[in-house]
Image: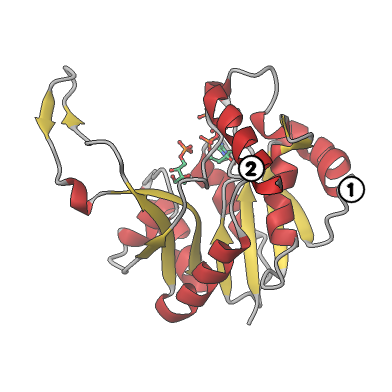
Amino acid sequence: MKVSVVIPAAGQGKRMEANKNKQFLLLDSKPILAHTITIFESSSSIDEIILVAESEELDYCQSEIIHKYNFNKVSKIVEGGATRQESVYNGLKGVAEDTDFILIHDGARPLLTNELIEHIITEVEKYQAVAIGVPVKDTIKIINQDKVIVDTPKRDNLIAIQTPQAFRRDLILEAYQRACEDDYLGTDSSSLVERLNKEVRVIEGSYENLKITTPEDLELAERIISRRLV
Ligand SMILES: Nc1ccn([C@@H]2O[C@H](COP(=O)(O)OP(=O)(O)OP(=O)(O)O)[C@@H](O)[C@H]2O)c(=O)n1
Ligand SMILES: C[C@](O)(CO)[C@H](O)COP(=O)(O)O
Protein backbone atom coordinates (compact mmCIF):
# COMPACT_ATOMS: atom_id res chain seq x y z
CA MET A 1 0.00 0.00 0.00
CA LYS A 2 1.32 3.43 -0.93
CA VAL A 3 0.42 6.62 0.97
CA SER A 4 1.16 10.19 -0.16
CA VAL A 5 0.65 13.45 1.64
CA VAL A 6 -0.14 16.82 0.08
CA ILE A 7 0.89 19.80 2.21
CA PRO A 8 -0.63 23.11 1.09
CA ALA A 9 1.69 25.92 2.19
CA ALA A 10 0.90 28.57 -0.41
CA GLY A 11 -1.25 30.87 1.71
CA GLN A 12 -0.50 34.48 2.55
CA GLY A 13 -0.98 34.23 6.30
CA LYS A 14 -2.83 37.55 6.39
CA ARG A 15 -4.34 36.91 9.83
CA MET A 16 -0.88 36.39 11.31
CA GLU A 17 0.09 39.92 10.27
CA ALA A 18 3.76 38.95 10.03
CA ASN A 19 5.90 40.55 7.34
CA LYS A 20 6.49 37.16 5.72
CA ASN A 21 4.74 33.84 5.07
CA LYS A 22 3.73 32.67 8.57
CA GLN A 23 4.98 29.16 7.78
CA PHE A 24 8.55 30.45 7.66
CA LEU A 25 8.27 31.92 11.17
CA LEU A 26 10.29 30.06 13.77
CA LEU A 27 8.78 27.71 16.33
CA ASP A 28 11.36 26.38 18.76
CA SER A 29 14.07 27.79 16.43
CA LYS A 30 12.81 25.90 13.35
CA PRO A 31 10.38 27.11 10.64
CA ILE A 32 6.76 26.06 11.23
CA LEU A 33 6.69 24.39 7.81
CA ALA A 34 9.82 22.35 8.59
CA HIS A 35 8.12 21.04 11.74
CA THR A 36 5.10 19.99 9.68
CA ILE A 37 7.18 18.20 7.04
CA THR A 38 9.33 16.49 9.71
CA ILE A 39 6.28 14.71 11.11
CA PHE A 40 5.58 13.03 7.75
CA GLU A 41 9.25 12.53 6.82
CA SER A 42 9.65 10.58 10.08
CA SER A 43 6.57 8.43 9.58
CA SER A 44 7.30 4.95 8.22
CA SER A 45 3.76 4.90 6.75
CA ILE A 46 4.30 7.85 4.40
CA ASP A 47 5.91 7.22 1.00
CA GLU A 48 5.98 10.67 -0.58
CA ILE A 49 5.30 14.28 0.25
CA ILE A 50 4.03 16.85 -2.26
CA LEU A 51 4.65 20.37 -1.03
CA VAL A 52 2.56 23.21 -2.46
CA ALA A 53 4.17 26.63 -2.31
CA GLU A 54 3.56 30.11 -3.62
CA SER A 55 5.28 30.73 -7.00
CA GLU A 56 7.76 33.25 -5.56
CA GLU A 57 8.60 30.96 -2.64
CA LEU A 58 9.38 27.77 -4.59
CA ASP A 59 13.15 28.39 -4.56
CA TYR A 60 13.13 29.45 -0.92
CA CYS A 61 11.27 26.27 0.04
CA GLN A 62 13.77 24.20 -1.90
CA SER A 63 16.86 25.72 -0.31
CA GLU A 64 15.72 26.84 3.15
CA ILE A 65 13.30 24.03 3.97
CA ILE A 66 13.86 20.89 1.86
CA HIS A 67 17.63 21.11 1.42
CA LYS A 68 18.45 22.65 4.80
CA TYR A 69 16.48 20.08 6.81
CA ASN A 70 17.41 17.14 4.55
CA PHE A 71 13.92 16.07 3.60
CA ASN A 72 14.16 13.06 1.28
CA LYS A 73 10.49 12.21 0.87
CA VAL A 74 9.49 15.51 -0.78
CA SER A 75 9.18 14.32 -4.38
CA LYS A 76 7.78 17.58 -5.78
CA ILE A 77 7.20 21.21 -4.88
CA VAL A 78 4.28 22.44 -6.94
CA GLU A 79 2.92 25.93 -7.40
CA GLY A 80 -0.10 26.93 -5.33
CA GLY A 81 -3.24 28.78 -6.41
CA ALA A 82 -5.38 31.68 -5.23
CA THR A 83 -7.33 29.54 -2.73
CA ARG A 84 -6.43 26.64 -0.45
CA GLN A 85 -8.68 24.45 -2.62
CA GLU A 86 -6.78 25.38 -5.80
CA SER A 87 -3.45 24.78 -4.05
CA VAL A 88 -4.54 21.35 -2.83
CA TYR A 89 -5.82 20.42 -6.30
CA ASN A 90 -2.46 21.35 -7.84
CA GLY A 91 -0.78 19.16 -5.24
CA LEU A 92 -3.15 16.24 -5.88
CA LYS A 93 -2.29 16.33 -9.58
CA GLY A 94 1.35 15.82 -8.63
CA VAL A 95 0.80 12.69 -6.56
CA ALA A 96 2.32 9.43 -7.88
CA GLU A 97 -0.14 7.42 -9.99
CA ASP A 98 0.39 4.24 -7.99
CA THR A 99 -0.59 5.86 -4.69
CA ASP A 100 -3.53 4.23 -2.90
CA PHE A 101 -4.35 6.84 -0.26
CA ILE A 102 -3.71 10.56 0.03
CA LEU A 103 -3.50 12.59 3.22
CA ILE A 104 -4.01 16.35 2.97
CA HIS A 105 -2.51 18.36 5.80
CA ASP A 106 -2.13 22.13 6.33
CA GLY A 107 1.46 23.35 6.34
CA ALA A 108 0.34 25.57 9.20
CA ARG A 109 -0.45 22.66 11.57
CA PRO A 110 2.98 21.74 12.94
CA LEU A 111 1.88 19.92 16.11
CA LEU A 112 0.33 16.81 14.59
CA THR A 113 1.47 13.56 16.22
CA ASN A 114 2.58 10.30 14.63
CA GLU A 115 -0.19 8.50 16.57
CA LEU A 116 -2.81 10.52 14.68
CA ILE A 117 -1.14 9.76 11.34
CA GLU A 118 -1.17 6.04 12.12
CA HIS A 119 -4.79 6.19 13.29
CA ILE A 120 -6.09 8.01 10.22
CA ILE A 121 -4.25 5.64 7.85
CA THR A 122 -5.77 2.61 9.57
CA GLU A 123 -9.22 4.17 9.28
CA VAL A 124 -8.93 5.30 5.65
CA GLU A 125 -8.06 1.75 4.61
CA LYS A 126 -11.45 0.74 6.05
CA TYR A 127 -13.64 3.74 5.20
CA GLN A 128 -12.05 5.46 2.12
CA ALA A 129 -12.62 9.00 3.46
CA VAL A 130 -11.69 10.15 6.97
CA ALA A 131 -11.25 13.51 8.69
CA ILE A 132 -9.93 14.43 12.11
CA GLY A 133 -12.06 16.54 14.42
CA VAL A 134 -12.55 17.67 18.01
CA PRO A 135 -15.78 18.49 19.86
CA VAL A 136 -16.42 22.24 19.89
CA LYS A 137 -16.03 23.84 23.31
CA ASP A 138 -18.05 26.99 22.68
CA THR A 139 -21.71 27.29 21.80
CA ILE A 140 -21.96 27.93 18.07
CA LYS A 141 -24.56 30.32 16.66
CA ILE A 142 -25.78 30.86 13.12
CA ILE A 143 -26.19 34.56 12.34
CA ASN A 144 -27.78 36.46 9.47
CA GLN A 145 -26.34 39.35 7.46
CA ASP A 146 -27.43 41.83 10.15
CA LYS A 147 -25.44 39.81 12.69
CA VAL A 148 -28.60 38.65 14.44
CA ILE A 149 -28.65 35.09 15.76
CA VAL A 150 -31.03 32.91 13.77
CA ASP A 151 -30.17 29.47 15.14
CA THR A 152 -28.28 27.66 17.89
CA PRO A 153 -27.33 24.18 16.66
CA LYS A 154 -27.20 21.43 19.27
CA ARG A 155 -23.58 21.25 20.40
CA ASP A 156 -23.57 17.46 20.70
CA ASN A 157 -23.61 17.26 16.91
CA LEU A 158 -20.84 19.77 16.28
CA ILE A 159 -17.15 19.17 15.79
CA ALA A 160 -14.29 21.40 14.70
CA ILE A 161 -12.62 19.75 11.74
CA GLN A 162 -8.83 19.64 11.48
CA THR A 163 -6.30 18.11 9.13
CA PRO A 164 -5.00 15.64 8.08
CA GLN A 165 -7.94 14.44 6.06
CA ALA A 166 -7.38 11.17 4.22
CA PHE A 167 -8.97 9.71 1.10
CA ARG A 168 -8.71 6.97 -1.46
CA ARG A 169 -6.79 8.48 -4.37
CA ASP A 170 -9.46 8.19 -7.09
CA LEU A 171 -12.19 9.50 -4.77
CA ILE A 172 -10.41 12.70 -3.80
CA LEU A 173 -9.30 13.38 -7.38
CA GLU A 174 -12.89 13.01 -8.57
CA ALA A 175 -14.13 15.29 -5.78
CA TYR A 176 -11.68 18.08 -6.71
CA GLN A 177 -12.41 17.72 -10.42
CA ARG A 178 -16.16 17.92 -9.81
CA ALA A 179 -15.79 20.94 -7.52
CA CYS A 180 -13.74 22.65 -10.21
CA GLU A 181 -16.36 21.91 -12.89
CA ASP A 182 -19.18 23.12 -10.61
CA ASP A 183 -17.33 26.21 -9.33
CA TYR A 184 -17.80 24.92 -5.79
CA LEU A 185 -15.47 26.39 -3.20
CA GLY A 186 -15.19 24.72 0.20
CA THR A 187 -12.98 25.51 3.18
CA ASP A 188 -11.76 21.93 3.58
CA SER A 189 -11.25 18.83 1.41
CA SER A 190 -13.89 16.74 3.14
CA SER A 191 -16.71 19.07 2.02
CA LEU A 192 -15.83 18.31 -1.61
CA VAL A 193 -16.32 14.59 -0.96
CA GLU A 194 -19.47 15.12 1.13
CA ARG A 195 -21.16 16.83 -1.82
CA LEU A 196 -20.71 13.65 -3.87
CA ASN A 197 -22.89 11.96 -1.23
CA LYS A 198 -19.98 9.85 -0.05
CA GLU A 199 -19.58 9.16 3.67
CA VAL A 200 -16.69 10.85 5.43
CA ARG A 201 -15.86 9.33 8.84
CA VAL A 202 -14.56 11.49 11.64
CA ILE A 203 -12.00 10.34 14.17
CA GLU A 204 -10.97 12.10 17.37
CA GLY A 205 -8.26 14.68 16.72
CA SER A 206 -6.37 16.70 19.31
CA TYR A 207 -6.86 20.23 20.65
CA GLU A 208 -3.08 20.54 20.38
CA ASN A 209 -3.19 19.98 16.60
CA LEU A 210 -3.85 23.66 16.15
CA LYS A 211 -3.60 25.67 12.95
CA ILE A 212 -1.22 28.59 13.39
CA THR A 213 -3.51 31.35 12.21
CA THR A 214 -3.06 34.37 14.53
CA PRO A 215 -0.14 35.44 16.80
CA GLU A 216 -1.71 33.85 19.92
CA ASP A 217 -1.61 30.46 18.16
CA LEU A 218 2.16 30.75 17.79
CA GLU A 219 2.57 31.57 21.51
CA LEU A 220 0.44 28.57 22.44
CA ALA A 221 2.36 26.32 20.03
CA GLU A 222 5.65 27.39 21.66
CA ARG A 223 4.27 26.36 25.07
CA ILE A 224 3.04 23.01 23.76
CA ILE A 225 6.37 22.24 22.06
CA SER A 226 8.43 23.14 25.12
CA ARG A 227 6.22 20.92 27.29
CA ARG A 228 6.63 18.04 24.81
CA LEU A 229 10.41 18.44 24.90
CA VAL A 230 10.66 17.98 28.70
N1 LIG B 1 -4.10 29.91 -1.56
C1 LIG B 1 -3.78 29.17 -0.50
C2 LIG B 1 -4.30 29.45 0.79
C3 LIG B 1 -3.91 28.67 1.85
N2 LIG B 1 -3.04 27.65 1.67
C4 LIG B 1 -2.58 26.86 2.80
O1 LIG B 1 -3.66 26.25 3.46
C5 LIG B 1 -3.38 26.10 4.85
C6 LIG B 1 -4.54 26.59 5.70
O2 LIG B 1 -4.78 27.95 5.41
P1 LIG B 1 -4.65 29.14 6.46
O3 LIG B 1 -4.05 28.71 7.71
O4 LIG B 1 -5.91 29.89 6.49
O5 LIG B 1 -3.50 30.01 5.79
P2 LIG B 1 -3.60 31.36 5.01
O6 LIG B 1 -4.60 31.28 3.90
O7 LIG B 1 -2.19 31.62 4.65
O8 LIG B 1 -4.09 32.37 6.14
P3 LIG B 1 -4.89 33.72 5.99
O9 LIG B 1 -6.31 33.36 5.64
O10 LIG B 1 -4.77 34.35 7.35
O11 LIG B 1 -4.22 34.55 4.90
C7 LIG B 1 -2.09 26.88 5.13
O12 LIG B 1 -1.07 25.96 5.38
C8 LIG B 1 -1.91 27.70 3.88
O13 LIG B 1 -0.56 27.96 3.54
C9 LIG B 1 -2.56 27.37 0.39
O14 LIG B 1 -1.77 26.45 0.21
N3 LIG B 1 -2.94 28.15 -0.67
C1 LIG C 1 -8.85 22.65 6.36
C2 LIG C 1 -9.00 23.33 7.69
O1 LIG C 1 -7.77 23.41 8.35
C3 LIG C 1 -9.92 22.51 8.56
O2 LIG C 1 -10.11 23.16 9.77
C4 LIG C 1 -9.56 24.72 7.55
O3 LIG C 1 -10.86 24.64 7.04
C5 LIG C 1 -8.71 25.63 6.69
O4 LIG C 1 -9.36 26.87 6.60
P1 LIG C 1 -8.57 28.17 6.25
O5 LIG C 1 -9.55 29.30 6.29
O6 LIG C 1 -8.00 27.94 4.87
O7 LIG C 1 -7.57 28.30 7.32
Please provide percent x and percent y for residue 175. Answer: 42, 61
Q: Quadrant of ligand 1?
A: top right
Q: Quadrant of residue 47?
A: bottom right
Question: What is the three-letter code of the residue carrying label 2?
Answer: Arg
* Residue under label 1: 67
Q: Residue at x 13, y 21 (%)?
A: 148
* Left or right of 4 on screen, residue 101: left
Q: Which mark is residue 146?
A: none
Please provide percent x and percent y for residue 58. Answer: 78, 39
**Colouring of the image:** secondary structure
Please provide percent x and percent y for residue 193. Answer: 37, 61
Mark nearer the N terminus (2 vs 1): 1
In the orientation shown, which residue stands out farthest toward the front? 230
Q: Is residue 93 visible?
A: no
Q: Which mark is residue 227?
A: 2
* Left or right of 60 on screen, residue 178: left
Mark 1 residue's CB less than 8 Å from ligand 1 = no
